Image (tube, rainbow, N blue to C red):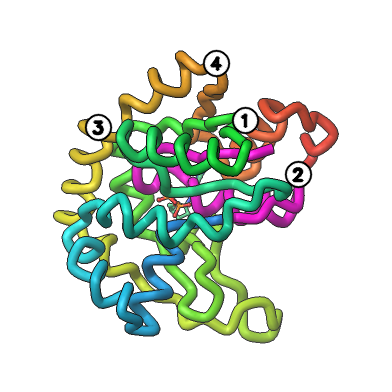
Amino acid sequence: MKLVLIGPPGAGKGTQGQRLSRLLSYFHVSTGNLVRAHIQAWTELGREVEGYNRRGEFVPDEVVLEMVGPSLEPAGRWILDGYPRSEKQARSLDGALEKRGIRVSRAILLDAPDDVLVERIKGRRYSQATGWTYHLEHDPPPQPEQHLDPGPFVRREDDMPDVVRRQLELYHEETEPLRNYYGERGCLEVVDGTQSIADVTKDICAALGNPDKNNA
Ligand code: ADP
């Protein structure tokens, strides 16, 4: 299974990617986390992409493909989150996969209206230690005595309201057409992202043909 997870900012791609990696042993490839890790470590790549991230804009296609490429193992089970974000990127991804003799098996679109997303993003927290995503109300960061994630749990630079608005505009213009792109290829599954985190996971598992994981 080679999965891509698409959806607007705040729809739950990172959250579901991390849950699926634990539940079904998928390798979770998050371009957002890769970008943030490069910026945090202030690598050459991090310096190149910092401005795009701060403004809520897409990182250039070739840069993001260079970042994710090594993780897209032909023999592996992976879930790609945050890429592709445009039809152009979807075509370059298809090209890169074709060279490896593989293709996207399923594209899961997490759908949610803008007002739900804007509200959710206000409570999002990101662990600088693990890259995991939490929510103050819906998925709180663990307590120190649980020894699960030391944090610190911070607001992301791109979670500020004007950046989120820019990301949503870009989503509607550039990413939403992927619904048709993957629909035409017969591999699209649309999941209602407004449900609880656990219910979204159940729907994704059902769409993947893992009904035994319905008690996730
Ligand atoms: P994305 O990766 O699509 O931008 P995230 O996974 O970071 O979205 O989720 C955005 C925020 O909403 C996070 O704080 C996350 O914990 C929370 N969240 C994710 N899915 C749900 C859900 N189904 N219900 C409530 N909150 C959610």
Q: Nearer the viewer, residue 52 or 45?
A: 45
> Circle 4 sits on which residue?
186
Q: Residue at x 35, y 54 (%)?
A: 121
Q: Residue furthest front?
A: 99
Q: Which residues are magenta?
A: 1-28
Report helix, strand or loop for mark 2.
Answer: loop
Where, quadrant-wise, is the N terminus in this rendering?
top right
Q: CA distance from mark 3 to mark 2?
A: 31 Å
Disc nearest the viewer among 4 and 2: 4
Residue 191 on image: x %, y %: 53, 28
Q: CA distance from mark 2 to mark 1?
A: 22 Å
Q: Check residue 172 in the rendering and tell me which mark sits there, or answer none.
A: 3
Residue 128 on image: x %, y %: 46, 78
Cβ atoms at labels 1 and 4 below 8 Å apart = no
Where, quadrant-wise, is the C terminus in this rendering?
top right
Q: CA distance from mark 1 to mark 4?
A: 9 Å
Q: Residue at x 35, y 46 (%)?
A: 9
Report helix, strand or loop for mark 4.
Answer: loop
All told, the count of numbered labels is 4
**In magenta stretch: residue 156:** no
Q: Is mark 1 within 8 Å of ligand 1?
A: no
Q: CA distance from mark 1 to mark 3?
A: 24 Å
Q: Residues within 10 Å of mark 4 (few under 14, many from 20)?
A: few
Q: Residue at x 46, y 63 (%)?
A: 136
Which one is earlier in the sequence, the residue at label 4 or at label 3?
3
Residue 142 lies in quadrant:
bottom right
Which one is earlier in the sequence, the residue at label 2 or at label 1?
1
Disc nearest the viewer among 1 and 3: 1
Q: Residue at x 35, y 81 (%)?
A: 43
Report helix, strand or loop for mark 1.
Answer: loop
Q: Check residue 105 in the rendering and tell me which mark sits there, or answer none.
A: 1
